[in-house]
Amino acid sequence: MEYKTTLTTCTYCGCGCNFYLETLDGKLTNTIPCKTSPVNEGKLCIKGWNVHQFVQNDRRLKKPLLRKGGELVEVEWEEALAYTADRLKAVTAEKGGDAVGFLASAKVTNEENYLLQKFARAAIGTNNVDHCARL
Amino acid sequence: MTNGVAELENTDTIFIIGSNTATAHPLVATRIFRALEKGAKLVVADPRKNQIAEFADLYLQHKPGSDVTLLNGMMKVILDQGLQDQAFIDANTEEFDGFKALIDGVDLDACAAATGLTVDGIEQAAALYAKAGTASIVYCMGITQHTNGVDNVKSLANLSMVTGNIGRESTGVNPLRGQNNVQGACDMGGLPNVLTGYQPVTLGAASKKFADAWGVDELPTQIGLTIPEMLSGIEEEKVHALWVMGENPVVSDPDADHVVKALEKVDLLIVQDIFLTPTARLADVVLPGCSFAEKDGTFVNTERRITRVRKAVEPVGESKADWEIIRDVSNAFGFEMAYDSPEEIFTEIAELTPSYGGVSYGRLEGDGIQWPCPTPEHPGTPFLHKDGRFTRGKGLFHAIEYKGPAEVVDAEYPLWMTTGRVYAHYHTGTMTRNSVALDREIPEGFLEIHPEDAAAIGVCDGHRVRLASRRGEIETRVSITERVEKGVVFMPFHFEEANVNKLTNPSFDPIAKIPELKVCAVAVEKI
């Protein structure tokens, strides 16, 4: 059996608590608060204590979905990526970059937000980038 | 936050307004409870008597949307009684005279009437805040989600400057950021007007620096659209494609029926998420991203602290890290991105962003770093505006007149409604409602209503009601409580099957474009 703990930062509110995620053979089993964290000093709220529970939930999306005949159906990545890129190319060619909008996210990492706005500004050519900071 | 979370522990007076701190930011509340143990005074102003209000030395239950009146009233008391820090004002601020002229004209009896408070209550709040050696303001979306949200924030800035409670340890104006990485998303240029580190898209030098680094001839220099503007842009056939990454506007945005119509109309809807959310169900293509536990990266917390996110498990199914998805789409689109790891991306961010200039993954082991951190030797910045040195030079006073909410109660919609969070759930519930323990804790939405209002419509605790506003209607059950005043109801917004955002008002602040989620008029009837 392979047991491991991984120090990371909570994905819920803006407190930014640190904890260890416990894994056993690749399954998340528990959350242990980090005592040396300058933010939470070994404490967590009810959401933090249970943060490992949603990650490997059965309802998670496991493959890309594409709308075909009105229904969302599972497809391979190659098809989903080609569809996304081709449709974006068509919209920008026909209507210009400002016909595309991007919603970045308060949930994903800095690196991911950076890449999305880079793609919007450098590849599509629009500043139509926003996220739920106001919500 | 201008100041760090831990500094709250050593504050003499903490003034919380429009923040349900114990529920929404429990580990910030911990520091406030510690401050109380050390003898701090706590003033809480909120239309709903939330949990932390139970611990307040002074609780002010002001009417929804009357924040500016309350704050101007407090500042009237401060100036009348000479409690201001004139030395700080003279040395570090501008436009005080115009501000003072407005405040001199404030009538405290009128403030009391407009807020539903007593003059004595406003005077006590002013004295507790202004007479403290160190006073911290803590606020959240109860201040900002109004059509006059910017005025509310500027009023808090006025209050901190007039008493010199800014630029020192354990003081400051401290907005609590509601989402783990909303600070980071803003820092990274996830906004229509700025690139990373708040470098304006309209500034030629910044635009050229990024264009050179990204290998393109030029970048767009016109400010882009905010979310509400994108949605109306779809209706006006100006916006034809929308890429939504890790957001659920169908549940989170005001006037949900209207949001759904826009998302159904847009020619191309790309949704990147970890669950099939109500927003993803409307998509043309859904790209399965993965959660924080399945990838590396960084988040920034409410006190500007950058910390590491580390991969604990492999992605579920064939889901991919969101940075890999963007990279792959970009490459398929024909704009080359060659990143192999989040650390490579972070290095690029640090090179282009002065406030992140000295940060690297190596330095983030341990406590993380609070930006600004311009050089590798810089220790980071626990609190901003040290010694009254503001980002713009001098602190600017604004004379703020009270403007009421966009929608007011009337005979047809006689109750004020406000919205918020509950302790076991988070935002649109995508994660918490898929957690066994949290779903069991609070499985459904509810409407908090005062006993007299409940009696008037003839319902008991747990009865179901129909709730309507000018924009839509929903059904839910009632929870009878004196936490809300007579005439005011409260509902959490986590529950898509009783989506309170079908009712909320999309009118927004003219500057910040933030919708007035905290005030609308509703009618309630028994089913």
Image (tube, coloured by chain):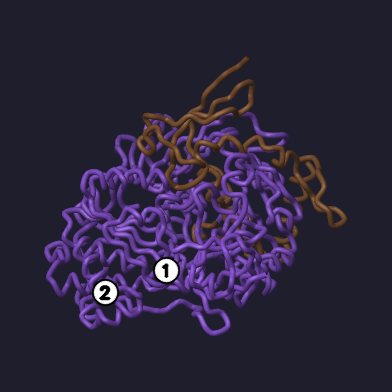
Chain colours: A brown, B purple
Quadrant (top left, top right, bottom left, bottom right) of the C terminus of chain B: bottom right
The residue that mark 2 highlights is: B73
Chain ID, mark 1: B
**As shown in the figure, which amino acid type bears the numbered disc 1?**
Gly
Circle 1 Cα neighbour tier, 10 Å, few/some/many (<14 / 14–19 / ≥20): many
Badge 1 and badge 2 in a common chain: yes
Q: Residue furthest top?
A: A1
Task: Tell me the number on the disc at residue B149.
Answer: 1
**As shown in the figure, which amino acid type bears the numbered disc 2?**
Gly
Circle 2 Cα neighbour tier, 10 Å, few/some/many (<14 / 14–19 / ≥20): many
The answer to whether any part of residue B221 appears in the image is no
Q: In terms of depth relative to the viewer, which is nearer, B33 or B516? A: B33
Q: Splitting the image into 4 quarters, where does residue B156 fall?
A: bottom left
Q: In terms of depth relative to the viewer, which is nearer, B84 or B497? A: B497
Q: In terms of depth relative to the viewer, which is nearer, B93 or B275? A: B275
Does residue A48 sit above or below B244 in this rendering?
A: above
Task: Tell me the number on the disc at residue B106.
Answer: none
Q: CA distance from mark 1 to mark 2?
A: 18 Å
